[in-house]
Structure formats: C-alpha cells, structure tokens
Image (cartoon, rainbow, N blue to C red):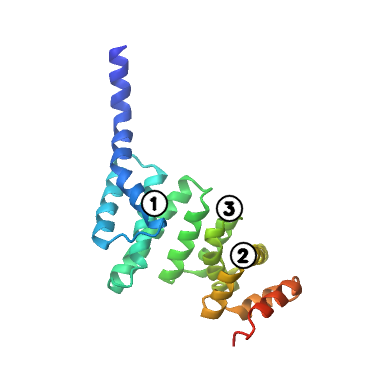
Amino acid sequence: MLALATCLLLLCWPRLRASFGYLPVDTSIALHWSGAVIPDLQRRALIARAGESLRQHGHYRYYDGLGTLHYLRGLDSALPVADRRAALAASAAATREVVGLAPMKPLAWLRLAAADSASGEHGEEIAAAFKMSVWTGRVEPSMMLLRLELGFAHRRWLDAEGLRLLQDQTILCWRLQPRALIGRFRSGAIDYSRVAALLARSHPDILTEMEEALDPPVL
C-alpha cells in the first residue's frame, strides 16, 4: 500500500506543484476583477508563474490566466506600443489554447475577439469569436457592453446568425444596463447609427425608447 501511495503521489506531484505555484495568479486576477490595479512588474512575475505551471501541467486554467495577464498588459497605455502589441498577440495565442481545450468559456472567446481587434486582426476571426462568446454564455451582463462594442465595430463581417446574436445582445443590454449603454452611445464607443440601422425594422419600439433616453440626440 505504501508503494502504491508513493507511486500515486509521484504521478500527481507535477499537477499539485503546478496548482500551488499558480495560486498567486488566481488571487491577483480575482483582485483585479474586484478593482485592484496590478503593477506591470507584478504582472510580468505572474506571467512567469503561469508559464511555469503550464510547463508542469498543460491545464486550460493556466492558459486562461496567462491570456488574461497578457491582455491586461496589452491595454496598459503606459507601456511602449511594441510591448502592448506583443502582449496582445501573446494573449490571443494563450486564449486560443483555452478555447481549444475548454470551448464553453464565453469570457475567453470575448477576450480573444478583443485581443484580435486591438491587434488589427482579420474581422472574420473577430466575428467568429464574438459569436462563440454569445453562444456559450448569452446572458452575461459583465460582458455585454464589450460584446456590443466589438460586434458593432465589426458588423460588416457578421453573417445573418451573427447579426441576430448582435440584435439579441443589444436588446438584452438595453433591458439590463440602459444607462451604461446610453453612456457608450454618447462616448462614441458604440456607433448609435449602426444600432438604429439594426433595430429599425424589427424593434422600432426599443429604438424609440433609446431615442427618448438620448434626448438631446447623438450627432
């Protein structure tokens, strides 16, 4: 029995070691989502930790953390443009591993679409990732605004199904987060004229509500 237990421990040790080593990454990302700022020096150290965990055990969770940390670097305006571009490319590469291993991850699909968009990648790939993000998690309030920003920015690459999903997300977001959506219209983050064109025939009532809330209108 002792020999069997020792054998099992030896077999499990790489996974256990990877998991223990990854704990600070999990903790830091959770703190980020709660509003904390991760300094770039710490982000780079966490990226190294996630990479080490991956070398010990190729679990999708470690790719997910790696993709998130690289994405945060890619959004950091304090970094040189070349560093940001490299970080976005690394985020997209890690996130493709995530969705390859665990495709039912709406946030990963959304991050892939956002990283590709910020990197100037092909619109067809961004549209495909947008659709997968909605299909795998339709009602995700924390993701809706970014989905709409990406969906309307790359609207011309969406097929009929993609447009239906974009319309659905627009209506859901309007019902769940109307003030935030109006804010995106006013800031220009979401082009209101594209929203109006999408909803004009199918949902004129909702379009009327938006126009009333936008008084004075967005020019």
- Look at mark 3 in the image and give the residue it sits on: 137
Q: Is residue 155 above or below residue 129?
A: below
Which numbered mark, 3 or 1, is in the foreground of this view?
1
Question: In percent of the image, x 28 and y 57: which residue is there?
Answer: 43
Q: Is residue 5 visible in this depiction of the protein?
A: yes
Position of 131 relative to 148 (above/below): above
Query: How far across and how far down the image is residue 139, in percent?
Result: 61, 55
Eyeballing the image, is 201 above or below 104? below
Q: Residue 106: where, in percent of width, then height?
A: 53, 53
Instruction: In this rendered view, identify the residue nearer to me: 126 or 210.
Output: 210
**Badge 3: few (under 14), some or many (20 or more) residues near its Cα, within 10 Å?**
some
Mark 2 or 3: the one toward you = 2
Nearest to N terminus: mark 3 or mark 1:
1
Which of the two labelled residues, at mark 2 and mark 1, occupies the earlier sequence position? 1
**Front one among 66 and 211:** 211
| Residue 129, visible in the rendered structure | no
In the visual, does 140 lie left or right of 210? left
> Residue 60 placed where, x, y %?
41, 45
The residue labelled by disc 2 is: 173
In the orientation shown, which residue stands out farthest toward the bottom? 219
Horizontal side, residue 209 vs residue 12: left or right:
right
On residue 30, the disc is 1
Classed neighbour count for the residue bearing mark 2: other residues with Cα under 10 Å, few (<14), some (14–19), many (≥20): many
- Residue at coordinates 25% horizontally, 57% vertically from top-left? 42
74 lies left or right of 45: right
Residue 154 quadrant: bottom right
The N terminus lies in quadrant: top left
Q: What's the residue type where badge 3 is placed?
A: Gly
Callout 1 amino acid? Ala
Q: Are marks 2 and 1 in contact (CB under 8 Å)?
A: no
